[in-house]
Image (cartoon, rainbow, N blue to C red):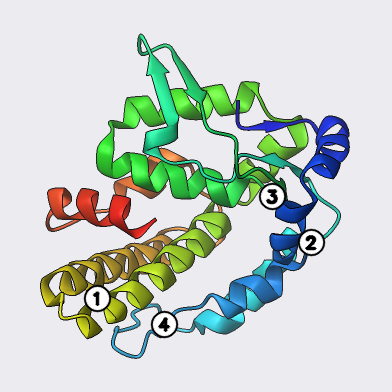
């Protein structure tokens, strides 16, 4: 559903050279993550003894060139997921596939689904995901879940903050403020995760439980608009 085993994806990735090249940053994910760190000067940091950029640099090595790599969907969002009879989840629209790590895309989709769907549907999606990826990819997700979630939050924040500034420059102040407020909620969530799981170990229900939004309807609209 989400990706194909490494042997098949290594062959199939040759069919998509342009996409593979455009996503080459995933092969050196450490520098990719650092470049995507948003400007956080306006946000208060509440995790004592932790410098965020150093924390990210130390943990970015999990995305090294040894894998596990898969053929990744490339545009996994609520609009491309079909849930049938509350028993199966399917992905559609595979036009943007690339060869790389699937876990960051998975968690960004889960964050979107939290704003749109119930935790039970998220669990259904995870169960389907587990059945359709290699054992190495599932183990990678389980062992590095907290780190992957934090990296993904930073990526989403980066997108939101950049678009917030662009909207305000265009005079769309209210939409810009919505994105900025959503970034603040994500920032608080990120810090709560780091405080709750200092050893980097956590499960998805416990992680998502820490995500509290002041206005869920606003967040739903903002996330769909952001990506």
Q: Is residue 135 found left or right of 186 in the rendered image?
A: right
Q: Which residue is mark 3?
A: 101
Q: Would you call the spot at circle 2 few (<14 residues within 10 Å), some (14-19), or many (20 or more)?
A: some
Q: Separation of disc 1 and disc 2 at Cα?
A: 35 Å
Image check: 138 left or right of 44? Answer: right
Q: Quadrant of the C terminus?
A: bottom left
SS type, badge 2: loop
Q: CA distance from mark 3 to mark 4?
A: 31 Å
Q: Which is more N-terminal, label 4 or label 2?
A: 4
Q: Pointer 3 and pointer 4: residues touching (CB < 8 Å)? A: no
Q: Where residue 47 sits: x, y (%)?
A: 40, 77
Of badges 1 and 3, nearer the viewer stands 1
Residue bearing the label numbered 4: 48
Residue identifier under label 1:
167
User: Looking at the image, which residue is at 60% across and 25% down?
Assistant: 1
Query: Of label 3 and label 2, which has the lower sequence position?
Result: 2
> Mark 3 to mark 2: distance in Å?
10 Å
Residue at 41 percent of width and 85 percent of height: 39
Could you tell which of marks 1 and 2 lies nearer the N-terminus? 2
x and y, in percent, of residue 187 in the image = 33, 70
Which of the 4 image quadrants contains residue 170? bottom left
Q: CA distance from mark 4 to mark 1?
A: 34 Å
Q: Marks 4 and 1: CB-CB under 8 Å? A: no
Q: Residue 130's image quarter?
A: top right
* Cβ atoms under marks 2 and 4 closer than 8 Å: no
Which disc is residue 214 wearing? none
Q: What is the count of numbered marks? A: 4
Q: Residues within 10 Å of mark 3 (few under 14, many from 20)?
A: many
Q: Which residue is mark 2?
A: 64
Answer left or right for 206 relative to 217: right
Answer few, some or many: residues within 10 Å of disc 4's Cα (few below 14, many 20 plus, some between 14 and 19).
few
Mark in front: 4 vs 1: 1
């Amino acid at each position: 559903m989400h990706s194909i085993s490494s042997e098949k994806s290594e062959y199939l990735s040759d069919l998509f050279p342009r996409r593979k090249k455009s996503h080459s940053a995933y092969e050196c994910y450490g520098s990719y993550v650092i470049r995507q760190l948003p400007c956080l000067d306006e946000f208060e940091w509440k995790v004592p003894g932790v410098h965020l950029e150093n924390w990210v640099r130390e943990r970015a090595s999990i995305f090294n060139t040894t894998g596990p790599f898969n053929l990744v969907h490339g545009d996994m969002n609520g609009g491309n997921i079909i849930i049938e009879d509350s028993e199966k989840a399917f992905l559609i629209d595979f036009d943007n596939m690339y060869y790389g790590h699937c876990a960051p895309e998975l968690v960004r989709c889960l964050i979107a689904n939290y704003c749109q769907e119930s935790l039970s549907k998220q669990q259904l999606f995870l169960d389907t995901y587990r059945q359709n990826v290699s054992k190495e990819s599932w183990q990678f997700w389980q062992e590095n879940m907290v780190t992957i979630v934090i990296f993904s939050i930073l990526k989403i924040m980066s997108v939101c903050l950049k678009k917030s500034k662009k909207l305000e420059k265009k005079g769309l102040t209210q939409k810009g403020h919505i994105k900025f407020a959503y970034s603040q909620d994500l920032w608080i969530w990120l810090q709560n995760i780091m405080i709750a799981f200092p050893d980097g170990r956590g499960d998805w229900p416990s992680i998502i439980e820490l995500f509290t939004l002041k206005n869920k309807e606003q967040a739903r609209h903002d996330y769909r608009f952001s990506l």
